[in-house]
Image: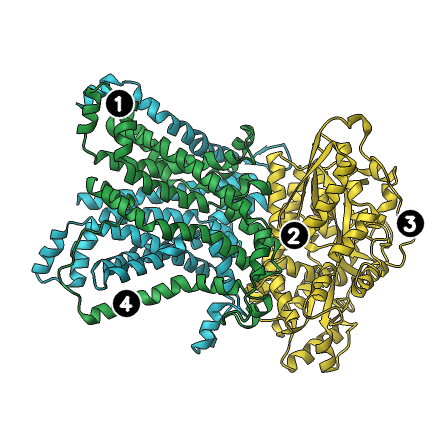
Chain colours: A green, B cyan, C yellow
């Protein structure tokens, strides 16, 4: 399974190292362009459709959902914003940031232990953690619900964060363990000789070397947490704590008589992630490519 | 060397593992065991009394047609997702990596196909619900324009099409994501293998079959496992788009469980569904791991 | 227990009529909350199913006024939509984290809370104070369980068939008063190329309103009540052939092409938009939705309504209207019962009822709230018709044990797609009812 590492370590890290010696035939080239052109239209058009219709009135959506809006109804956005999307966004950012930081930290520690030490029960611990990969969160839903109540954290941020971290650990640990196993040991040895302890080695050697995998794992986790629906639906009841996926359901049901306002709200909620992705894509690729050479 | 470090830091690995183990114990493993215990009782959210029913919930579950309907839908989900998100994605990845198109264009295609993956599932679900609308939705209008009026239907409202319409949305959202993962895997395949194949006169297809496919075998195996287990865990997109309807036609285990727990208020029965789901996903993953491993040994 | 308000306890009329608002609102000035607790800071959690911005604005206004009068009480409001509310309130019950004041549909949905001891008995708080003078008493009936009152109605709602005046005029039609006339109207529309009825059944509560009405008018009232309450003998539950007839009539509307294509594929709101856009002649609507029509391009003068003549010749009561009060209950686990009562009492004051009607266009259950000054004529007329009816047949999907409902609702969708026939659905309902009855007797 070690080969998985490069894949997972680099969602966006596409090392651009290769030149391509032979040029493809024009027929081949055009077939690929047409094929991917179709896929691109299918991928993008629903989003474009959402965007253009979010500026219409309900009536136009009904009668002319293809056309560009005749009048651009910016007030749809005003109304959607007034409904309080900002609150959901802030909650999502908060929950995602905290969950991802915790998951990465805890997993890195576990991965370090599992890849750089020999100790009794090592295999058992490895299976204990990786076993979590196979578990559907649904299985834990009802018991988790009661455990969160008993801990007194039902309907708090922690009710989302702690389960997110617990369910994120297996995959992230798996990624990081593979990655660390591929790292050269010389720097660690040198640090030990200089009198560093395991924690110092982790902090000063492993963490800097593992930046690429940390970045990739954080991204994968961020996407998972950002979109998580079931726990957020069940473990949160206050409007003030809802994350975006649940908040969207709130405004869909609250504004259901105004579909184009709902659409504006959807666009507003989608925008941050799209912008973030488009803006950081290149940096991730560069940063991770640099890391990938070391790895 | 390793042993020296190990001696010197006897407790260290345990301390490093502690947070992960505690979190997983409390929030992952204890709930799984609890779930089994819960399934042995009849209880609901209102009454404090729990009635011991032993395996009664399972006896009721096994002949329940909705249970089998759900499993059937999960199986469809898994088959289609593996075919599209893994195998079609692999072919697309290989095509993009074959340098048939220039770098700019290939980056554009990759980014475009990836983009749906960054959208929250509720955004996707609600958007597609509108696209599927029988009267004003885009799908039927496209069919109308290209003269396929007889194909138009209430995609989410008909028992035959509901689950497939939802599955299609999942493919739309995840195809690009898995394609990118596979592109990275392809780039990790040693270049020399391709050159050697070319020298042997292998064309695009044979390079794909003889070099790419074996080269990304491990990644593919993991992605297949994740996709299949994911297909059995699916809840959100179905709940948002159809809530399992019409007439349970698009019910999957996740929605069946949620509905049983929080609509019908039969917590014990829902726990039995959860336990069955646990066995199913666990068995599937185990079988695939075993198959993958024995395939490697052979 | 009675689902239609008039059964068993004799006929009660809902004295809501707009003009009948004789009882002058009792002026309630000053503090309502007990002075003894005035110092303690109290937070009440209030949870309902109206997250629409306009609704929130109304409730927030009342809360602000209430807090101003009772500085020691803070009311914290949360709301989710109609459909998610059904899950969310159960989740909250299961969590033990029950809001102090929560919404409940009338009938079985409310009694379930009462049976499980999760709702506060409000009988004396209501009857022994001026509260009873502020709220239309007959609307409290579906919140009574075991002779005690567990909920206070906030508003009153009923289902009518709304029609487009333009389409009716165009085709020379008039409001039908019998089932045959109704079918004739549908037939005429269909012939002219117009979809007769807009219908969105993506969430199948929409068909439960149709079928509830058919049941109420086709099935003898005592039989229906014994079935809904699961009080009939197990063998006899839901076996009356008139239930099959009810489903057959419902199905025939679809089979004849009187509904739009694929009702299961669109939501009720989409159907209403289609009706407003002139794509159909009629739609089965709640009284509270009249305001949506009035504010739409259709306009206040663009639509009329009539009672759905669904059961002509049937064994049920033809003077029933399908509808129900919507109200609030107080958690039995609340730490602040007196404050919660004080808030609920304040919320249902006639002045707030009037404000409710004025701001939202929805009939309030407070005495004398609907008047010609604050409501459109159709709403006033609707309220009058409710008052003249022999009673309300409660919403089918909240007036039965959830198990029976969960057998009924998917059955409606299956009827529309043709994958089940009426007898098949009733067989499922019968089986679910037998099981639910066994469960209930276990407890």
Instruction: Classify the position of the N terminus of chain B by image quarter.
Output: top left
Estimate the x, y position of residue C183 in percent, counting from the top left. 71, 75
Foreground label between 1 and 4 = 4
Which numbered circle lies on residue C24? 3
Picture coordinates of residue A237, whole percent (x, y): 59, 41
Confirm or deny contact between disc 2 and disc 1 (CB under 8 A). Answer: no
Up-down relation of residue C238 to residue C134 (above or below): below
Which of the 4 image quadrants contains residue A120? top left
- Crowding near pointer 3: few (<14 within 10 Å), some, many (20+)? few
B135 or A103, which lies in front? A103
Quadrant of the drawing holding the C terminus of chain B? top left
Residue B132 seen in this snapshot: no
For the residues marked 1 and 3, what is the alpha-carbon distance in whole angstroms? Answer: 83 Å
Q: Which residue is at 53% across, 59% downward?
A: A263
- Up-down relation of residue A150 to residue C388 (above or below): above
Quickly name the residue at label 4.
A33
Q: Are marks 2 and 4 on the same chain?
A: no
Q: Nearer the viewer, mark 1 or mark 3?
A: 3
Q: Which residue is mark 2?
A: C53
Q: On what subunit does the disc labeled 2 rest?
A: C
Sequence-wise, the earlier of marks 1 and 4 is 4
Could you tell me residue C279's position as x and y percent?
A: 63, 74
Q: Residue at x 88, y 47 (%)?
A: C25
Q: Which residue carries the number 1 mark?
A: A119
Q: Quadrant of residue A117?
A: top left
Residue drawn at (60%, 54%), measured in percent from left and top?
A253
Q: Secondary structure at mark 1?
A: loop
Between the residue at mark 1 and the residue at mark 4, the CA separation in whole angstroms equals: 54 Å
């Amino acid at each position: 399974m070690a080969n998985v590492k490069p894949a997972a370590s680099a969602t966006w890290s596409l090392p651009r190292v290769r030149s391509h010696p032979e040029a493809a035939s024009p027929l081949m080239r055009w077939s690929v362009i047409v094929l991917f052109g179709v896929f691109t239209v299918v991928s993008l058009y629903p989003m474009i459709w959402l965007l253009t219709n979010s500026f219409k009135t309900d009536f136009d959506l009904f009668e002319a959902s293809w056309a560009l809006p005749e009048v651009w109804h910016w007030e749809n956005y005003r109304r959607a914003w007034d409904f309080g999307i900002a609150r959901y966004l802030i909650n999502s950012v908060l929950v995602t940031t905290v969950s991802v930081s915790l998951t990465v930290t805890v997993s890195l520690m576990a991965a370090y232990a599992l890849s750089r030490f020999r100790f009794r029960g090592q295999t058992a611990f490895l299976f204990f953690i990786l076993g979590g990969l196979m578990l559907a969160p649904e299985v834990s839903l009802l018991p988790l619900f009661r455990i969160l109540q008993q801990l007194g954290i039902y309907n708090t941020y922690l009710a989302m964060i702690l389960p997110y971290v617990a369910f994120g650990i297996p995959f992230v640990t798996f990624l990081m363990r593979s990655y660390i196993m591929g790292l050269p040991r010389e720097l660690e040895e040198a640090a030990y000789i200089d009198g560093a302890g395991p924690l110092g080695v982790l902090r000063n050697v492993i963490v800097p070397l593992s930046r690429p995998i940390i970045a990739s794992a954080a991204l994968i986790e961020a996407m998972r947490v950002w979109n998580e629906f079931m726990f957020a639906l069940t473990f949160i009841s206050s409007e003030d704590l809802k994350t975006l996926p649940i908040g969207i359901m709130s405004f869909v049901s609250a504004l259901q008589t105004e579909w184009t306002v709902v659409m504006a709200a959807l666009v507003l909620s989608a925008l941050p992630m799209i912008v973030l992705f488009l803006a950081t894509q290149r940096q991730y690729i560069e940063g991770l490519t640099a890391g990938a050479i070391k790895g | 060397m390793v042993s020296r470090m190990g001696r010197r830091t006897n407790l260290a690995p345990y301390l490093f593992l502690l947070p992960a183990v505690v979190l997983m114990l409390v929030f992952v493993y204890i709930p799984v065991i609890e779930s089994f215990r819960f399934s042995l009782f009849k209880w609901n959210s209102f009454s404090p009394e729990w009635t011991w029913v032993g395996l009664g919930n399972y006896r009721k579950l096994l002949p329940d047609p909705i249970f089998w309907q759900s499993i059937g839908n999960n199986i469809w989900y898994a088959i289609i997702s593996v075919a599209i998100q893994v195998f079609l994605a692999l072919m697309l990845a290989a095509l993009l990596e074959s340098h048939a198109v220039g770098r700019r264009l290939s980056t554009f295609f990759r980014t475009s196909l990836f983009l749906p993956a960054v959208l929250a599932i509720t955004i996707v679900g609600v958007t597609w619900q509108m696209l599927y609308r029988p009267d004003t939705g885009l799908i039927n209008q496209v069919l109308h324009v290209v003269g396929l009026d007889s194909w138009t239907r209430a995609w989410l409202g008909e028992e035959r099409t509901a689950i497939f319409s939802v599955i299609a949305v999942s493919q739309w959202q995840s195809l690009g994501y898995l394609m990118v993962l596979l592109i990275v895997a392809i780039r990790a395949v040693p270049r020399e293998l391709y050159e050697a194949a070319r020298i042997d006169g292998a064309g695009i297809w044979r390079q794909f079959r003889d070099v790419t496919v074996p080269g990304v075998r491990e990644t593919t195996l993991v992605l297949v496992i994740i996709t299949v287990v994911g297909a059995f865990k699916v809840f959100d997109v179905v709940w948002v788009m159809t809530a399992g309807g019409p007439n349970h036609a698009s019910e999957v285990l996740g929605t069946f469980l949620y509905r049983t727990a929080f609509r019908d208020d039969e917590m014990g029965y829902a726990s039995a569904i959860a336990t069955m789901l646990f066995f199913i996903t666990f068995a599937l993953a185990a079988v695939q791991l075993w198959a993958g491993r024995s395939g490697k040994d052979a | 227990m009675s689902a239609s308000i008039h059964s068993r306890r004799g006929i009660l009329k809902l004295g809501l009529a707009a003009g009948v608002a004789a009882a002058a609102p009792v002026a309630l000035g000053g503090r309502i909350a007990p002075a003894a607790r005035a110092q303690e800071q109290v937070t009440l959690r209030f949870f309902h199913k109206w997250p629409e911005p306009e609704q929130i604005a109304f409730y927030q206004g009342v809360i602000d006024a209430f807090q101003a009068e009772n500085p020691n009480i803070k009311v914290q409001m949360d709301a989710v939509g109609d459909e998610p509310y059904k899950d969310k309130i159960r989740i909250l019950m299961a969590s033990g984290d029950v809001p102090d004041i929560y919404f409940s549909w009338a009938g079985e949905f409310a009694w379930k809370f009462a049976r499980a001891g999760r709702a506060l008995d409000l009988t004396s708080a209501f009857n022994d104070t001026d509260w009873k003078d502020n709220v239309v008493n007959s609307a409290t009936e579906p919140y009574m369980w075991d002779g005690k009152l567990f909920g206070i109605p906030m508003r009153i709602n009923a289902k009518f068939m709304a029609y487009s005046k333009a389409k009716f005029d165009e085709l020379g039609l008039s409001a039908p008063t019998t089932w045959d006339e109704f079918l004739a109207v549908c037939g005429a529309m269909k012939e002219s190329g117009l979809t007769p009825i807009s219908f969105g059944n993506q969430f199948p509560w929409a068909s439960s309103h149709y079928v509830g009405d058919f049941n109420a008018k086709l099935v003898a009232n005592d039989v229906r009540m014994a079935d809904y309450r699961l009080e009939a003998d197990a063998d006899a539950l839901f076996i009356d052939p008139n239930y099959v007839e009810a489903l057959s009539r419902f199905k025939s509307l679809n089979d004849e092409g009187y509904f739009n294509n694929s009702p299961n594929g669109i939501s009720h709101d989409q159907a209403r938009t289609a009706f407003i856009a002139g794509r159909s002649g009629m739609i089965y609507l709640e009284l509270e939705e009249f305001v949506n029509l009035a504010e739409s391009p259709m306009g206040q003068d663009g639509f009329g309504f009539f009672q759905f003549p669904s059961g002509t010749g049937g064994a049920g009561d033809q003077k029933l209207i399908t509808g129900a009060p919507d109200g609030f209950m107080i958690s039995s686990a609340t730490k602040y019962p007196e404050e919660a009562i004080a808030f609920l009492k304040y919320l249902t004051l006639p002045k707030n009822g009037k404000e409710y009607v004025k701001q939202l266009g929805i009939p309030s259950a407070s005495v004398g709230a609907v008047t010609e000054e604050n409501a459109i004529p159709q709403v006033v007329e609707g309220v009058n018709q409710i008052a003249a009816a022999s009673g309300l047949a409660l919403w089918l999907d909240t007036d039965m044990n959830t198990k029976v409902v969960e057998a009924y609702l998917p059955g409606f969708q299956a009827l529309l797609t043709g994958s089940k026939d009426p007898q098949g659905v009733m067989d499922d309902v019968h089986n679910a009812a037998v099981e639910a009855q066994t469960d209930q007797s276990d407890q």
